[in-house]
């Protein structure tokens, strides 16, 4: 049960990081009313997009961990049968 809960939380974290990462990468560059001052600068928009890339990298790393956990769970199930 503990392993299932761990894998479920890992899957939720992958979903969260992927959704937030895609949003942060794309949102600053969508056509909308430009923000005044520093918030509308290319530097700030690039910074926000960079945070999105960090979220996507975390999602990829945790997805790799999740697939290893699922593979281990599958192999444990095969051994006990």
Image: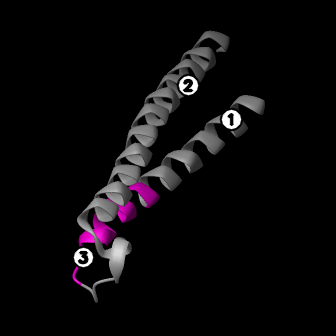
Q: Nearer the viewer, residue 16 or 9?
A: 16
Position above or below: 63 against 33: above
* Mark number displayed over residue 69: 2
Report helix, strand or loop for mark 2.
helix
Q: Residue furthest front?
A: 37
The structure residue drawn at horizontal position 52% and vertical position 55%, both measured from the top left corner, is: 16
Q: Which residue is mark 1?
A: 6
Of marks 1 and 3, which one's residue comes earlier in the chain? Answer: 1
Residue 8 image-quadrant placement? top right
Q: Nearer the viewer, residue 23 or 68?
A: 23
Instruction: Please count the marks in the image.
Output: 3
Residue count near mark 1 (Cα–Cα under 10 Å), binned few <14, some 14–19, many ≥20: few
Q: Which residue is mark 3?
A: 30
Locate the C terminus and report the quarter of the image it occupies: top right
Q: Which range of residues does the magenta coloring cover? A: 20-31
Q: Residue furthest right?
A: 1
């Amino acid at each position: 049960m503990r392993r299932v809960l761990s894998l479920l939380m890992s899957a939720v974290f992958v979903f969260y990081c992927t959704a937030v990462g895609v949003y942060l990468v794309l949102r600053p560059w969508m056509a909308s009313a430009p923000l005044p001052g520093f918030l509308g600068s290319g530097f700030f928009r690039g910074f926000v997009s960079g945070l999105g890339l960090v979220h996507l990298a975390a999602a990829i790393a945790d997805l790799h961990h999740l697939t290893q956990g699922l593979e281990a769970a599958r192999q444990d199930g095969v051994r006990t049968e």
